[in-house]
Each structure stands twice: as structure tokens, then as C-alpha cells.
Image (tube, rainbow, N blue to C red):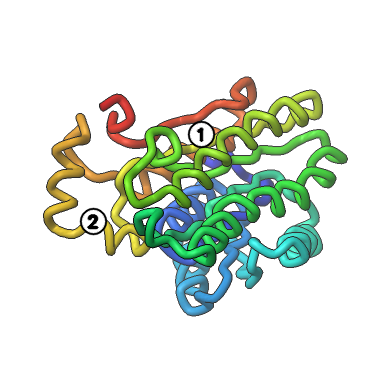
């Protein structure tokens, strides 16, 4: 099924993990995908190669989306290359986990800038061209930590909770222009970002805490993003879709 034939998507932080899973899913369904990365050129090229292997079209663009001008450049280069922008997935993220008594200001600022300011930066850049075309799908990646909190993650949870409030407000601003804004909140997904957290013991506890009894995959998240980016979700906006195996209910 080619739900995104003729569509162009930007996926930030698409060099690996969840971002790669999202980029691949959109490409498999026909989207031309801009693979964004900040400093992982080799891995971003691997994502593009995987897209090409399934018959898709990809363009790798390096940009630090936590910087306003870089996010503007990313969107401008994507539109210059493909002529339009239909889907924006704000996935770029990082962690600096520690208890607040030991947290340094730099650890707070880095997480807020990467996880939250980047969402503002990219949405700001994408809003005008989407409004002009009267079409757009924006999907922002949050986390169950942003919904329920997590010890040692005050910075990360704050950034991901803020993404939810930001998205709901933006959905109200852009809805009249046929632009939807939604959030996907993954649970425990084994990626490079969570490798330090999901030790053998922590993985066992995470699985036990998840009603479906397993960790999530990048493919699980990619499928949810693809739904919200599709025309099948044209009457869905301002919503948070938890892709967490039921973890947030606990």
C-alpha cells in the first residue's frame, strides 16, 4: 500500500533507532524522505541505503535542529530538492539522565534544546509552506516519561511533557489550514538512546511492567507515525498515541 505516493517527509534524527524505523516505513509506503542527522553521517547514509533498497527515494541533510537557523535551512533544502513538504516528524532527541541533585545546568539545557527547542524550530520552519499549500501532517515524538515521569529524568520528562502541550496548542493554531499535529509517545524501545538504561535487569523489569510483555520496536513506532501521517487520520489532531504495550496504564 502506497499511502504516501507523491508525498515528501522530513524525519529528524533519522540516522538510527526510532527515526530510522519511521523513515523506512514512510519510504516503503511511497514517501520521498529527507533523512536528517546532526553528526551521524555514516549511519544516516545507511538509512538512505536501506530506503533505496526498498525502492524508495531519500536525501540526507545534516543539520543541528536544536539551532534555529539550522532547522530553517533543513526545511528550505528539503523543499528546494523535492518541491514541497507534506510530513514533518520531529524525532531528534537525547538524554542526560541523573538525579536532580547531581544534574548540571548543561545537562538540563542540552536535553531541553535537543528535545523541545528543536520541535519549535522545525515546526516554525515548516508551518508557512504547509499553510501556503493548505496541507500538512506534523508528528512529534514524545515518551511515556513525558506522560508519567521517571526518576532520574526530570530534564527528559520535562522536555517530552512540553512536546505534548506544544503539539496540542499548535494543532489548534493550524487546524483550519488542513494541517494536523499529533504526538506519538513510545514506551520502552531498545535503541542506542536507551542502551545505557536497558541493562539486563532493567530490561526484565521493563518487560514485567508492560502488559503486552515485551519491549517495543522501531517498527512499532513507525507504524503509528505512518497512520497519523496518512489521510486515514485526516480527522485526528491534537492527540497523543501511546505506543507502549500498555505501560502508561500501570
Instruction: Tell me what residue is drawn at x 65 percent, y 69 percent.
Output: 63
Instruction: Tell me what residue is drawn at x 72 percent, y 61 percent.
Output: 71
Assess disc 2: are there few (<14), some (14-19) or many (≥20) residues with their C-alpha within 10 Å of its C-alpha. some
Percent across and percent down for residue 182 are 58, 33
Percent across and percent down for residue 137 are 66, 38
Q: Which mark is residue 170?
A: none
The vertical placement of 71 against 209, above or below, is below
Answer with left or right where residue 241 lies relative to residue 128. Answer: left
Answer with left or right where residue 70 lies relative to residue 42. Answer: right
Q: Nearer the viewer, residue 129 or 190?
A: 190
Percent across and percent down for residue 216 are 29, 44
| Residue tagged 1 | 227
Marks 2 and 1, how far apart in space? Answer: 28 Å
Instruction: Tell me what residue is drawn at x 72 percent, y 32 percent.
Output: 179
Instruction: Tell me what residue is drawn at x 14 percent, y 38 percent.
Output: 208
First in residue order: circle 2 vs circle 1: 2
Amino acid at each position: 500500500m502506497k499511502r504516501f505516493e507523491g508525498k515528501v517527509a522530513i524525519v529528524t534524527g533519522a540516522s538510527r533507532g526510532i527515526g530510522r524505523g519511521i523513515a523506512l516505513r514512510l519510504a516503503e509506503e511511497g514517501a520521498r524522505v529527507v533523512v536528517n542527522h546532526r553528526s551521524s553521517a555514516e549511519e544516516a547514509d545507511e538509512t538512505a541505503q536501506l530506503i533505496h533498497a526498498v525502492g524508495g527515494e531519500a536525501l540526507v541533510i545534516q543539520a543541528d535542529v536544536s539551532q534555529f537557523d539550522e532547522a530553517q535551512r533543513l526545511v528550505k533544502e528539503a523543499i528546494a530538492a523535492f518541491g514541497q513538504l507534506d510530513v514533518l516528524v520531529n524525532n531528534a532527541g537525547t538524554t542526560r539522565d541523573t538525579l536532580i541533585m547531581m544534574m548540571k545546568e548543561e545537562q538540563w539545557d542540552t536535553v531541553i534544546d535537543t528535545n523541545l527547542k528543536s520541535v519549535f524550530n522545525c515546526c516554525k520552519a515548516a508551518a508557512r509552506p504547509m499553510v501556503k499549500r493548505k496541507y500538512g501532517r506534523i508528528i512529534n515524538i514524545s515518551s511515556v516519561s513525558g506522560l508519567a515521569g521517571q526518576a532520574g529524568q526530570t530534564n527528559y520528562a520535562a522536555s517530552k511533557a512540553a512536546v505534548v502541550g506544544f503539539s496540542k496548542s499548535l494543532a489548534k493554531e493550524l487546524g483550519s489550514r488542513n494541517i494536523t499535529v499529533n504526538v506519538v509517545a513510545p514506551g520502552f524501545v531498545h535503541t542506542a538512546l536507551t542502551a545505557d538504561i536497558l541493562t539486563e535487569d532493567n530490561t526484565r523489569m521493563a518487560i514485567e511492567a508492560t502488559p503486552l510483555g515485551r519491549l517495543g520496536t522501531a517498527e512499532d513506532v513507525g507504524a503509528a507515525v505512518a497512520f497519523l501521517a496518512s489521510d486515514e487520520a485526516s480527522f485526528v489532531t491534537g492527540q497523543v498515541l501511546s505506543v507502549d504495550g500498555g505501560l502508561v496504564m500501570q
